[in-house]
Image (cartoon, helix red, strand yellow):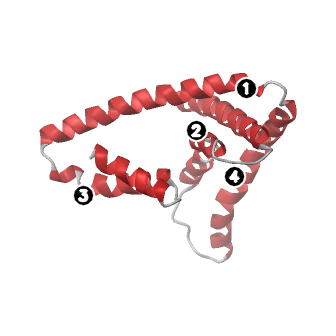
């Protein structure tokens, strides 16, 4: 199962596509088909192995992000821009999440999600993950450091704020 996922990631990257999206797609398909076709002991072992790899990977990624904070010096315009984007993000996200239900209501149709579910959609879209920062590492432009600083600040702030709200 692990090698199949890795092969999918490599194939996506070799074809010039997103290896991460290929891996997500592979995980969804394998979670539905492959996982159910192995024994219970293999299911427990696979779950434990992936949980262990997940914790190790998460520790590595956040250590890398923490070390990347040291590269921010001298990019105060980028930090200011990141905080402006963070302040505008809740408003823009709210408009985008609540616009479709409003259109449905104006057309006289019933929207399937409740207000609480829409609020969860709004909040979950506020947190930006390390994938955004990883994609910034692949950009080749003279403004790469500026873009990386913005992404790093947004990821760090939204992760800290999001984890604070999720713990309550």
Query: For the residue labelled by badge 4, is the local secondary structure a helix, a strand or a loop?
Result: helix
- Residue 25 drawn at (x, y percent): 41, 57
Label 4 with label 1: CB-CB less than 8 Å = no
Earlier in the chain: of badge 3 and badge 1, it is: 3
Q: Residue at x 58, y 54 (%)?
A: 118
Classify 10 Å Cα crowding around label 1: few (below 14), some (14-19), many (20 and above): few
Is residue 122 at all visible to an observer of this figure? yes
| Residue of label 1 | 71
Query: Label 4, label 2: how many angstroms apart (C-alpha)?
Result: 19 Å
Is residue 168 at all visible to an observer of this figure? no
- Residue 34 drawn at (x, y percent): 23, 54
Residue 139 in the image: above or below residue 12: above
Query: For the residue labelled by badge 3, is the local secondary structure a helix, a strand or a loop?
Result: loop
Query: Label 2, label 3: how many angstroms apart (C-alpha)?
Result: 29 Å
Which residue occupies the extreme front position in the image?
14
Classify 10 Å Cα crowding around label 3: few (below 14), some (14-19), many (20 and above): few
Earlier in the chain: of badge 2 and badge 3, it is: 3
Q: Residue at x 60, y 49 (%)?
A: 119
Query: For the residue labelled by badge 2, is the local secondary structure a helix, a strand or a loop?
Result: helix
| Residue of label 2 | 130
| Residue of label 3 | 33
Q: Residue at x 23, y 50 (%)?
A: 35
- Residue 3 drawn at (x, y percent): 30, 46
| Residue of label 4 | 93
In the picture provided, is 168 more to the left or to the right than 73? left
Q: Quadrant of residue 114?
A: bottom right
Query: For the residue labelled by badge 1, is the local secondary structure a helix, a strand or a loop?
Result: helix
Q: Quadrant of residue 150?
A: top right
Q: Quadrant of the C terminus?
A: top right
Q: Quadrant of residue 77?
A: top right
Earlier in the chain: of badge 4 and badge 2, it is: 4
Q: Residue at x 44, y 31 (%)?
A: 57
């Amino acid at each position: 199962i692990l090698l199949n996922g890795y092969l999918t990631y490599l194939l996506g990257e070799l074809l010039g596509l997103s290896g991460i999206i290929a891996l997500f797609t592979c995980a969804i398909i394998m979670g539905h088909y492959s996982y159910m076709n192995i024994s219970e002991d293999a299911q427990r072992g696979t779950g434990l192995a992936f949980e262990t790899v997940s914790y190790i990977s998460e520790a590595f990624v956040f250590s890398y992000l923490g070390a990347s904070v040291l590269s921010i010096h001298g990019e105060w315009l980028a930090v200011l821009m990141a905080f402006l984007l963070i302040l505008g993000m809740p408003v823009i996200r709210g408009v985008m999440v609540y616009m479709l239900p409003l259109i449905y209501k104006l057309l006289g149709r019933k929207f399937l999600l409740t207000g609480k579910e829409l609020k969860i959609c709004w909040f979950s879209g506020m947190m930006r993950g390390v994938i955004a920062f990883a994609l910034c590492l692949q950009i080749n432009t003279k403004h790469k450091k500026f873009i990386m600083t913005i992404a790093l600040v947004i990821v760090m702030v939204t992760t800290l704020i999001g984890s604070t709200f999720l713990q309550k």
